[in-house]
Amino acid sequence: MELQHKLAGQCAIVTGAARGLGRAYALRLASLGADVAILDADLRSFEAFEQEKSAMTADTAMAEVEAMGCRSVGIEVDVTQPDLVTAAVTQVAETFGRVDIVVCNAGGGMGGLAETGGSVLEDEVLDAVIRRNLYGTMYTCRAAATIMKAQRSGRIVTTSSLAAKRPEMGGGYAHYGAAKGGIEAYTRYLAQELGPFGITANCIAPGIIRTGRTAPIHDALGSDTKSKISLQRFGTPDDCAGVIEFLVTDLGSYVSGALIPIDGGLF
């Protein structure tokens, strides 16, 4: 099988894939021959960010995947709703006949640094961020694992963050860091449970990654922040997509329960 078709005949699900990192993962998987299901709360979320919108090569991420010769389906789903997540994953399995790869990319924070310290977090904000990140990941993995166990094969990739290991000065965004730390622990447990079924589960932890949404923020950070990164540059979605490729192809077949930082050697 040719390198670019390593995933031919396989089906991948990527959450939060309408733009940004998730879109990069979806396109990388399609470039390897996989059919890709795009799950996102808003399949046109790229329209809210000019640089994301200008990066699109077709009307939607699904159309971009199809232009690469693979099948795609888009499903709008809130990953904090377990019944909706199960229904979406079931729909994908019924459409493509299987689920081989799941990349849990959906997540994100809420609130400013001043009001998200661990001792001052309001219940509503805490609950929303924990559900969006930790619960959303668990719901997605749970739904996919049922199908993968029946197949006795599968690759699961979850997403942590630099925030789980490196708190902000002053302790802001504690809810986000705690949620991502929980994802790391959950993934290790998942790997132990699912290994006997031929399923791997690994977690990536992106550092400072430049996307169309975050570009203005990173521009403001400037050279001082770059100087703290060994490679002296911010990361790109393709940097992260390369690690996804490793974990879901034969290259990563004996890797499970791992946490892989993608931070350029950030001090």
Image (spheres, helix red, strand yellow):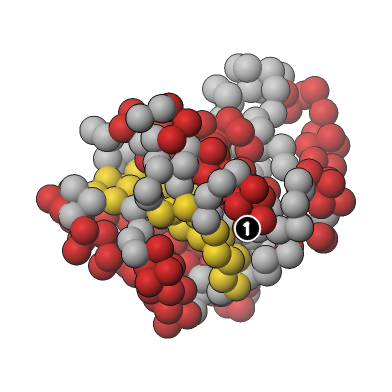
| Residue 119 appears in the figure | no
Q: Nearer the viewer, residue 110 or 233?
A: 233
Decide if residue 152 is on the left or right side of residue 176: left
Q: In the rendered image, which quarter is residue 239 located in?
A: top right
Position in image of residue 198 (x %, y %): 18, 48
- Left or right of 169, for residue 12: left
Instruction: Read off the residue under disc 1.
Output: 62
Residue 198 in sight:
yes
Question: What SS does tag 1 mark?
Answer: helix
Residue 131: image x %, image y %? 50, 70
Q: Which residue is at the far left?
A: 196
Mark 1 crowdedness (10 Å alpha carbons): few <14, some 14-19, many ≥20: many
Residue farthest along the bottom direction in this orientation: 83
* Residue toward you, 95 or 248: 95
The amino acid on which the numbered mark 1 sits, given as a three-letter code, is Met
Q: In the displayed structure, would residue 43 be above or below residue 255? A: below
Quadrant placement of the C terminus: top right
Compared with 128, 264 (above or below) is: above
**Residue lying at 21% horizontally and 58% vertically, measured from the top left:** 151
Which of the two residues, 88 or 109, is positioned nearer the viewer here?
Answer: 88
Name the spot of residue 186 as percent of width and height, x first: 33, 56
Dividing the picture into quadrants, the one containing residue 43 is bottom right
What's the residue at 73%, 27% (across, down)? 225
Q: Quadrant of residue 40?
A: bottom right
Q: Which residue is drawn at the image coordinates 78% and 37% (left, top)?
A: 218
Q: Position of residue 178 (x, y in %)?
A: 48, 56
Number of marks: 1
Give the residue drawn at x 46%, y 57%.
13
Picture layout, residue 172 above or below residue 87: above
Question: From the image, which quarter does the N terminus lie in?
Answer: top left
Q: Is residue 109 left or right of residue 39?
A: right
